[in-house]
Structures are given as C-alpha cells and as structure tokens.
Image (tube, coloured by chain):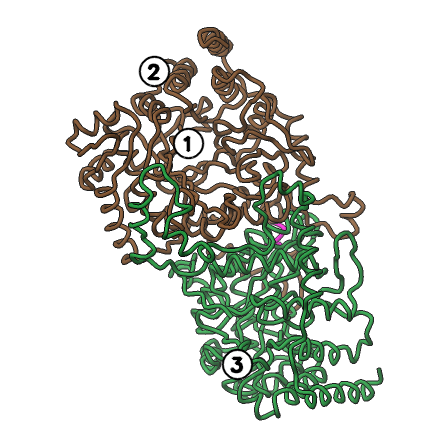
Chain colours: A brown, B green
Amino acid sequence: MFRNTMPRYEVLSQDAMAKLDVAWRRLMTEVGVEFMSDRALDLFRAAGQRVEENTVFLDPEFVLEQVAKAPREFDVAARNADNSVHIGGDAMAFGAVYGPPFVRQGDVRRDATMEDFRSFTKLAQSFPVLDSAGGVICEPNDTPLDSRHLDMTFALQTLTDKIYMGNVVSGVNARDTIEMGAIMFGGRDVIEQTPVSISLINCNSPLRWDDRMLDAQFEYSAANQPVVLTPFILMGAMSPVTIPAALVQQIVEALSGITLSQLIRPGCPVIFGSFLSNIDMQSGSPTFGTPESATGLLCTGQIARHFGLPFRSGGALTSSQVADAQAGYEALMTMLPTFLAGTNWVMHSAGWLEGGLVAGYEKFIVDIELVRMMREQFRPLEIDDDSLAFGAHVEVGHGGHFLGASHTMERFRTCFYRPLLSSSENYERWMRNGGVDANGRAERIYRKTLEEYVQPPLDDAIREELAEYVTRRRRELGD
Amino acid sequence: MFRNTMPRYEVLSQDAMAKLDVAWRRLMTEVGVEFMSDRALDLFRAAGQRVEENTVFLDPEFVLEQVAKAPREFDVAARNADNSVHIGGDAMAFGAVYGPPFVRQGDVRRDATMEDFRSFTKLAQSFPVLDSAGGVICEPNDTPLDSRHLDMTFALQTLTDKIYMGNVVSGVNARDTIEMGAIMFGGRDVIEQTPVSISLINCNSPLRWDDRMLDAQFEYSAANQPVVLTPFILMGAMSPVTIPAALVQQIVEALSGITLSQLIRPGCPVIFGSFLSNIDMQSGSPTFGTPESATGLLCTGQIARHFGLPFRSGGALTSSQVADAQAGYEALMTMLPTFLAGTNWVMHSAGWLEGGLVAGYEKFIVDIELVRMMREQFRPLEIDDDSLAFGAHVEVGHGGHFLGASHTMERFRTCFYRPLLSSSENYERWMRNGGVDANGRAERIYRKTLEEYVQPPLDDAIREELAEYVTRRRRELGD
C-alpha cells in the first residue's frame, strides 16, 4: 500500500462544484434511481423515501445523512498482516485487471482458462506494488459456470496472501465468498470486525441498479464487507456526451447505492466508485486512456473528497490490442491522473488490454512498471543540507563531473528509480542483446516471474477446510 | 500555439522554495560560474562583479536586477502570421526533436541526411499542434559541416511557414541565421522589433558556459532574438544525484546566462531553460521519462514563475530504441508534466528516440498524438445547463442509452477527442485490417503525410534572395 502525500491536482473551481451540487440534487429528486429489488425498495420506503414502481426519488438531505454514516477510512485485512491495506485518506491500494474473458500472450489471443487465472494470480502475488490480485483477474472459461466463483476465491486465498475481491454474480456467490473468508480468518464475527474483501457493485447506468448485483450488495454490506458502488459510464452510451452531465449522473448513482448500503447496515464501509470513459462516436467502440476519462478521473477524486468518501477509479486502461506504444501511453494517460487524484482503490492496475476484454501477460509487466514509476514520482522531495549537496559542488567545481564525488558514491545504489522493464542500453549493447523491444522484454519478465513464484505459506487445516467447502458447495450447486 | 488555462501542479512548498532560494544565492556567490569568453568576463567586470580567471562570482541581488529587465512574455513572428507564437504566461509552444545524428524508420537505424531533415521539416509543417520544426531536427550528415547551417535554415524557412530555431554552433553561424531572418522578414530592424527565431544556448554543466555557445548568444541577444539559457543536466553526471541540488544548480546556471544576455542588450528576450534528467548509475547511460525528471520538470515550472520568466522544458523524451510501449509511456511521463507545469517553450515535442540520438519517423507520429491528447485534456470544463444536460436524462430515463438522444445528436461529431493514431477497433475488425500495431499505423500516417505535404507559398524574390545568400556564404565558407 502506498501513501500519496503529494498535493492533489484539482481542476474544478468552487463555482463548478456548486453547479454540480445543484444538478445532482435535481436529478436525484426529479428523475430518481431505479432499484430492481423489492428488498431495496422496501428499505427506501421504510425510510420515508418516495417510491414509484421501481424508481426511488431520493431526498438529497436524507442521502447526505446516510452517506455521513459511512466511514471516511477503513482497513481491509490480508491473511499476511504485512499486506493488509488501508482504504481512504492518502492511502492508495492497487488490484490487477478485473473481468476479461480473453488473454493475450504475445501474438496469441484466446479464451482465458483457470490456468491463466492462477498464473495471473501468481504474478499479482509476486509484485509488491500490487495489493491484490483483484477478483476476476480473467474469466476461467474452462470451469463450470455455477461454481467457478469457488475456484477463483480458493485460488485468490491460497496463491496470494493479499486482500482479494468478492464474487458479485449473485447473492449466493457473495455468501460463498463470505463463508470462505470466515473459514480463512477464523469466523464471521472476525471478518465483520475487520473486513477481508472488497466487492464491486456496478450500476447498470444510467440510473438503474440490477437485482443480482443488489443481492450481492445486501450480503456484503450486511457482513460489513466493503462494496464499491460504481457507476459504469461510457459517455455517449450510458450518459450524455458531456463530462459535467456524466459527473452529475455518477454522483447520483454512487450516492444512491451508498445510501442503500447504509440502510442495510449503518456504518458499513463503502467506496465511491467510478468507471468513466467514453465511446468512439463513429464506431460505438468504447475508448480508454482518453483525455475525457483523465479529466473525469481528476474531477471524481475532488467530488469523492467533497462527500468525505474513499473512492475507486483509474487503472492502466487502454483500447489497444497489444502491448505497443498506444498501450503504453493510454495506460499512463489513466495511471498518472490516478495518482494526481489520489485514488484510494485502484482496480485494473495491471494487465488490462483491448478495452478490458483481454488480460495481457506482457501488458501486465508494462503496467507494473508504471505503478512502480508513479510510486517513485509521488514522493515528496526532501530538501535539506544533505540533498542540497553544496559540498559536492565545491568538490567537483566548474565543468567537472559528479560520477566519483563522495556525495554520489554514498548514494549511487539507491538515488534513482531502478526500472523493471525499461531499457536505457545504448544501441550497440541493445542489438547485442537481441534488439528486443519492451513487449519482448515483458515476456521474459513474466515467464521468469512465474518460474520463480513461491506460494505463500498457509495452515494446512485452513487449506483443507477451504478445499472441503469448495467440494461440498460445488456438489450442492450441481457442477 | 496553445493556451493552458488549467491550474498548475506545484509540488514545492513555500518552505522548500525558501530553502532553494538560500541555496542558489550561496552557490552563485561562493562557487560562481565559469564563462569561457573574454567578452563575457569584461561585461561582468564592467558591471562590478568579482571575476577570477574565468569564474564570475555573481552578486544575487545584481542577478535579480538583471533578470527583472527581461520581458515576462514576448512574441515570436512566423512568416505566416497565423503561426506566430507568444512565449510566456499561459501560452505553450511546441517544436520538434532537436539534435539527433541518426534516424529510425521501422527496423532501419542509420545516419541522418539532408533528405531526412527535409522530410521531418515537412512533417512538422503538416501538423498544426507543432508551432515549429525546431532547429536541428536531425543532423544532415551528408552535407558539408561548415555550411550545413545554411541548408538547414533555408529548409526551415522555405518548407515551413512557422517559427524556427537559430543555429548556435558558432557566432558566425548565428550571424548567418540572423541575416537570413532579415532577408525573410524585410530587414534587421524588423526582426529586432519582433523576433523571428529562438536559439538554444546550452550550459556545459556544471557551472560553465563555453565559448562557441557564448559567441552565438552574443549575436542573438544583440539582435533581440530570444535565447533559451539551458542547464544541461543529467543528474549523477552533470549535477549531484539529488533533485534539490540539481534544481539549485539549474537556477544558478540559467540566471547567470540570462544575466549575461541582459548585459549584452538590456530587455532582450530570454527563456529560463531546463534539460533535466538522470543517468543510470549502473551503466552511466542517460535515462529519460524517469520519475526524477518528471519531478524536476514540475519544480522547474514553479521556479521559473517565481523569477517571472518564461521557461523551456519537457518534450516527448524516452530512452527506448523503438516506438514501443516504453517509448509511449516514457514520452507521456515527460509530456504530461510538461502540461501540468505549463511549460512555455517545449522542445523535443515530436520524434525523440533513443535518448535523443535518433529522430524516429514512427515516434514522431506517436508524439503528435500525445500533444493532441494533452491539448484536449488541458481545456477547462464548461459547466452550464447545456453541458449538464438534465433534459437528456429526462429523455432517456433509467437503464436506457444516450446514443440517439437529441443532446447526443447535436454534439456527436465534436464531443470527444478524435485520435490520429490510437485504435479502438474491436478485435475482429482490427485483424481484418491487418492486425497492425501502433508502430505500423504510425508508419502509414507519416508516409501519407509526406505524400500529401504542400509547400507553403513564399514570394519568389525572397526565396531567390535566400538561395543567393546560401550560395554566396557557402562559397565564402569554403564548402
């Protein structure tokens, strides 16, 4: 986990914030939000909110009261305490890509398998800059649909000792995830005390929460496990084409979902979610790493802080098919604003390719490099006599060089960022080493990392109990 | 030219600025700066500064008095008035890569030629986001050394109608550049009134200004042509390994050069220069697009504003050999801070490859895309009823889509950034189109751009006079 103590880059004026404030209240009140769940509608009705069919017309003041019950910051425990994370404040935590049905290895693009899921999970375990493998790091298409959440959760729990994300396909799946967390950590009361998973609840934007996601939300919030209430907005399709309109919609969606969580269990942890990009208006394709999404990200951070909520956004997004120059710059087009905004929970930090349809092995390594670089860049400068190095100037004088200066000799091992992937070899040396580009070097790195992977230790009794749970539940689910 | 009216991202506290202030005064006073030019030393001596051998120990208050004579902002005229630029304030102007002896086209890396120089100049003319082809866009190795500055200046003046950079190899070359400017614009008095070129005066860091560069500086400043006084710092070699020390050195070097220009001609235009990165301490290779250089860039902007000076920094720098993922993210690692810092004059904005040794044709296109994206991102949001689009929400309702909404239909052609290079094609379509990565697509774009290049019109009499000047001077120079 990283502490970002650098300044936030905020682009919305007070006047702009005030206009957004008026606008979300109006949208919340006059258009309202659909909840495709009777349980949710009953809760809103009981709390005195106007409900017509599936639409809830929320009173903004009521919403703000509920939002104020959510913790501004909270902890999520990993089974290795060194890997536990803090969510909120100046803390930033990073998870790998989430959701791709396909994988890419070099020139091969194919359906993802459980073996891929395990490989990516091992990669996530291997790089300290990732706090989590995430959840659906890729979709294991070769495992039975109804029970694959058990296999995925088991892999996340046993192949990593970091925090993991909960399955959200249904309430049943959510209960299984919670049960497995209780087994791992010593009981439901323990995980209700300090949560052990984070779960992604996506809005069916615009302004609709669907039943299966809501079922999962009910389970997680009741168990005090944090949920990320995420408007899923590709501007032009799921929102108007203008950024201010998308921001307003995002506030209404996120706050309405957060309000529901607070009605389920007051004080339960929530995260203001954002997944905000746009489509190509010619083709209708989603596009990532765009100027619009970067601006949206910066604004989202400012808005979430305004409401006193930790927020999720960003990642290493790209539309590119392969780990090429476009993938490099689009990923950083998202990751640099992710840091400028001080994003608390960063999904899709490594491996995202092709608009999220593909988990890329090489791209995973490119993105790890980006997160490493950003963590280095977002460290405050220490300005003191030591770093001002007047003596080194006296020692070296005019037109000399500092390679052998004592100030240099004392610091040369650690003074600068050491890249994982980037090459600064001169041409002759680079050619002697095969003239391999970043994509080719990334391949070498991920293969070597997988070879050297060491499974983190786990108590045999716990592993056995988890395995038994998976076996029993798979049978019960008929797979 | 671009107006960056977004907030600046400033990372130095007031306390940090105060410490840097104490430190540069001490370095200036106690270690001083070497000027390898008797003319320069005479000017400093005449102004009452302490001179010992070639070292000038400058009084900080005297320096600040001289610096205050420099204009905070100024114009540089292009022969097409639409392409004239403003330097300083919130204006940002962009020039192409400067200095590479080699070029890369796809897999081929070779010595640059005059034909390459012309091709890159044509590319720079073709993309509106570039304000200048720069100066030595690549080194035309197949032309005679003593007269190639004439060929380059002629190409810059005739193949583009944008501003250009002056040759700085010697005082003689500078005089030729000024003469050719006078021919183009109608006389020396005209260009002294509004300058027509910008010239790069590099420091031989640490703390030494060499004679040939100084000779050029004397010519340009006397002719009221702006010079960019640029500390050339790769931390670890030309400065201590710590960023604060490099910043202090940069202040001393830049301000000492600026002071000289003000002694040559009080009030002449200058630019606070910065070329700040670091070496790899294992190999000694220069590295670019590093976290340290990004931090240095942000600080430089803040420092230059503190002194009330326009500044130069940034670009699309990378150590990569080819236009791969590394080239993409390293270029943006520099270009995004370039905008965050509000850099006024941006050299190396397009084509930089392999630590500046190579001008890359494909990389040129990658970089044009980056500048286009940044210009889009650094536009303030307009928040009004129109962009808040309440009516669109009423029209679309819950769970619908905005593709056909009237708010969308009115804006779909211009609402989002339109990429030049980036692809968001879906996999099937991308494969049908040949499965070409960003490097391959960039090749198609630069070739098509060169095919479609149209030379900007120029008065025949002026062209003839320039050509005659080149012919005469080449003969006089013995080439």
From mark 3 to mark 2, how far is it between C-alphas?
A: 71 Å
Which residue is denoted by mark 2 in the rendering?
A: A188
Q: Check disc 1 and report its element: helix, strand or loop.
A: strand
Between residue B112 and residue B319, name the one nearer to us: B112
Work out whether B120 lies above or below A241: below
Is residue B433 found left or right of B376 in the rendered image? right
Could you classify mark 3 by the number of other residues whose Cα lies within 10 Å: few (under 14), some (14-19), or many (20 or more)?
many
State the residue at coordinates (73%, 78%): B149
In terms of depth relative to the viewer, which is nearer, A336 or A83? A336
Residue B17: % across, % down:
42, 63
The amino acid sitting under disc 2 is Arg
Q: Residue at x 25, y 42 (%)?
A: A31
Q: Mark 3 belongs to which subunit?
A: B
Q: Is residue A133 left or right of residue A109?
A: left
The residue identified by callout 1 is: A85
The residue indicated by pointer 3 is B269
Mark 2 and mark 1: Cα distance apart in space: 19 Å
The span picked out in magenta is A406-410
What whole-number distance in Å separates the C-alpha atoms at marks 3 and 1? 53 Å
The reply, left or right, for residue B220 in relation to residue B309 is right
Vertical order, A303 against B268 (above or below): above
**Residue that appears at 43% across and 58% down:** B9
